Amino acid sequence: MQNLKSLLRGALVTSAAFGLISVGALAQASSAAQSSDQSAASSKKSSKSSKSSSMSSDSSSAASGAKLSPADKTFAMKAAQGGMAEVELGQLATQNAQSDDVKQFGQRMVDDHTKANDQLKQVAEQKGITLPTDLSAKDKAEKDRLSKLKGAQFDKAYMQHMVMDHKTDIAEFQKESTSGKDSDLKNFASQTLPTLQDHLKQAQQVSKAEMGTAKKSTTASANPKQ
């Protein structure tokens, strides 16, 4: 009888122990599930926050572009197209020119205006502006005209165009540097202006030299040696 009581008491203790273990396991499982839910919620919240931040950044750029004055936008567009034209015509000069001075000037146009174009693109990205990627109709026509010329004829026509074109560019950049509303575009214009002025000075010198060469060539042709 005593042994039977001991067995029953032992069974009850064992059963109670298993019950406690089960309760503990359930508690741990519940805690793990809650932790997982919290982690998922936190991750979802972080994702929403990141998306919201990205949308806010895009919206900010677009808003910045929308705030630009019509004059500032016009300047940026024309400067982008003009810069592309200088690069493409400069490349043409390195191929079609006869004079080494003209070829060197053309290469300088490629180098300097590629750099300026990259700077303008950075400003445009900050402002949310989409710059043109093609030449204007006027610049395309000029490129087509010059591409048909070679040697001395090309040298004279190209340098004359460079003189006139840089006079126009300088006037536009001077206006933006003093009257522009956007500080970044004003800074770009101010920083690029001295380079354009130097381009004009060099273009005038080379053009004058090429005109003199062409005049001597014409005189010699008209008065051949007997």
Image (tube, helix red, strand yellow):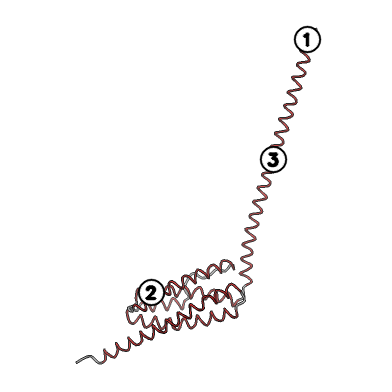
- Packing grade of label 3 (10 A; few <14, some 14-19, many >=20) is few
Check the image and name the residue furthest to the top: 1
Give the left or right position of residue 89, taking residue 75 as reference.
Answer: left
Mark number, residue 4 = 1
Measuring from the top left, give residue 185's x and y in whole percent. 57, 74
Measuring from the top left, give residue 102's x and y in whole percent. 37, 78
Residue at (74, 23) in percent of width and height = 17
Q: Helix, strand, or loop for circle 3?
A: helix
Label 2 amino acid?
Leu
Q: Are marks 2 and 3 in contact (CB under 8 Å)?
A: no
Q: Are marks 1 and 2 in contact (CB under 8 Å)?
A: no
Number of marks in the image?
3
Measuring from the top left, give residue 129's x and y in whole percent. 57, 69
Question: Which of the two discs, 2 and 3, labels the residue nearer the N terminus?
Answer: 3
Question: Which of the two discs, 1 and 2, labels the residue nearer the N terminus?
Answer: 1
Pick whichever, 125 or 190, lies toward us.
190
Residue matched to label 3: 35
Pick whichever, 191 or 26, lies toward us.
191
